[in-house]
Structure formats: C-alpha cells, structure tokens
Image (cartoon, helix red, strand yellow):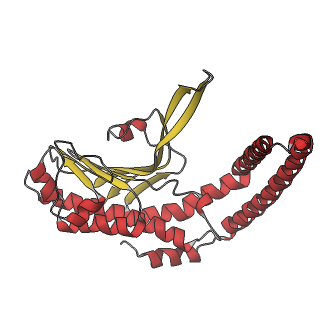
Amino acid sequence: MMKTFDEIYQELKTEDMQEINKLYECVKKKSKNQKRIALIICAIVDILILFLVSANLKSVFFSMFAIMFIFIIDTVIYVIITLISGFSKEYKELNTQYKNIVIKKIINNFYDNLEYFPYKSMPEYIYENAGYEYYNCYSSDDYFEAQINNKYSIQMAEVLTKEKREHEDANGEKREEEIVKFKGLFAKIILDKNINSELRIMQNGKFLLDKNKLNMDSSEFEKYFDVKTTNKIIAMQLLTSDVMEELIKFEDKTKMKYDIYIKNDELYLRFHSGAMFEIENLKKEILDKELIEKYFYMLNFTYNLSNKLINIINDTQI
C-alpha cells in the first residue's frame, strides 16, 4: 500500500542512521577544511600576483587585467579543490548509502518489483528513441526498472545530454564549447494499448507554425504548454480537464520545465530538474525534510500522471 510523505519520513527517522550520519559529518568537516585551504591558497597567490605586477598597477587597463586574471586563477583553484573533495572515499561511500537508504525507499513507495542501480546508466537508445533535440554527448546514472501497479514497465534515470561544438576564434585557433541540452529525470513507460499516433506536450515547444499544432480550449493550459499531435481527436480524448489541471498544478508548484511524449504504446516523461538524487543537494542534515519532500512530490506526480494516462488510454476507443 502506498504511503504518505509523512509516513515515509517518519520511517526514515526511525531507521538506524548512525553510520550514514557519521559519514555525513566527516564529509562536511573535510569540505570546510578544504574550503579554508582553498581560500588560503587563493590569498597567497593573489598577494604574489599583486607583488609581481605592482609596478604597472598605475595603468587602469593593466589594473583591470590583473583583477580579471586573479579572479580566473582563484576560480580555477577553488573548483579544483572542490572537485578533489568529491572524489574522496568518504564522499563516495556517503553518496552510495544515501541513495540506497533514502532514495530507494522513496522510489519503492510508488513502484513494484523495483531494481535500482545508483551508478548504472540508462541505455542511450531509450532516450534517443524519444526524438528530442540534437546532442552528441550522453551520460546517465540512478537508473531503475520497475512496474506500475505490477503491470506496466517503467524505466527511469537521471540523464545529461550536451552538444560539443568546435569553432575558430579571432586568431584562427580551434576552440571547443559544451552546451547542456538536457539535465534531469527521464522516464519511459510501456502502455497496454497502442494509440497509433503521437502526442507531444512541451513548454516553449515552438509549435506556432507546425501543421500538427493543437489549439486547446483552455487558455490557462496554453499559457504553459504547447501541444502537437498526429491525431487531434485522440489527443483531445487524452487531454481531459483532469489531466490538464494536474499538469498546471505541478507547473505552478515546482516552476519546473517538463515535457510529455506519447508515441504509439510508449509514454515518455522528461523533467528539467538538474541533478536530483545527490548528496550535494543536502543543506543541513541527511534527512533534509524539504529535499526529501521534493523527491517524494516529483515521483508521486510521475506515478499519478502515468496511472491517469494509462487508464484514459485503456478507456479510449482507438
């Protein structure tokens, strides 16, 4: 039986968290020490740079250049030391325990026959089949396979896609830049029934001149979402007032960009949530109530929306 957030949170509080709390305090202490070291190194480097260029500081241009150079050096030092802390044995162990104790418990509340692989990647072809924007760099973790109501297969993971581009600068030298295309949660659900069409719901979908754009009766819904479909009759049957209300409610509460795609007997959900199930998101304690509630709400919405669409599709005459 599915539990409420308060029930899940209370169960987590009663579990033996001694080891994970000890690890968390150790990681926090190390992180503080590393930040102090970073600040000390930055201060020493800044003083050395200022000493070496002090003779030229009367020039406004040179002064501005020195300030920019110091800022860049300080940023690089801070980032390197922060990255080193993320590779520590304690950090990795804490992240693993957090996923297996906290995250797994929340996921398990909504889905049956769960198999959760915190450091496994979702196969790229699953994401690629949804036909999103162009990318040429893919990575993923927090992959899980499960069932909705012991019947409908669901695969979900955190996914990051980027586009790597090469361009020439003013001096003719080749430069590479990375553009993040998507970073967040992605899910695929197998439906029982084939709708023999496609329905895509997006925010800022840019469907204005698309011949398959669907104009909705709800002006409030159209404020947030763009819809296109290859079968307008089926699309209108699926986008009931109840479904539209749920989509608007989630948008109002989270302010999170997300999109939905139904292709024949496959349902795809994509949330632009950024990195989700990581200890770097914790603020004060392992059982960060606000953060756990955010995870719970997202997975609850995913379950409710999937379940609702499955039932509507099953009841729709196709």
Q: Quadrant of the N terminus?
A: bottom left
| Left or right: 200 in relation to 139 | left
| Left or right: 260 in relation to 45 | left
Q: Is residue 139 above or below residue 23?
A: above
Quadrant hosting residue 317: bottom left
Quadrant hosting residue 222: bottom left
In the rendered image, the residue lying farthest to the top is: 172
> Which residue shows up at 68% across the image and 68% down it?
21
- Where is residue 272 drawn, in percent x and y? 43, 53
> Which residue shows up at 80% across the image and 53% down it?
38
Residue 187 vs residue 48, the one in the foreground: 48
- Where is residue 281 drawn, in percent x and y? 59, 61
- Where is residue 225 drawn, in percent x and y? 28, 57
Residue 247 vs residue 179, the one in the foreground: 179
- Where is residue 148 drawn, in percent x and y? 31, 59
Residue 267 vs residue 169, the one in the foreground: 169
Q: Is residue 265 above or below residue 2?
A: above
> Which residue shows up at 61% across the image and 55% down it?
96
Q: Do we see residue 314 in this rendering?
A: no
Q: Do we see residue 240 in this rendering?
A: yes
| Left or right: 217 in relation to 202 | left
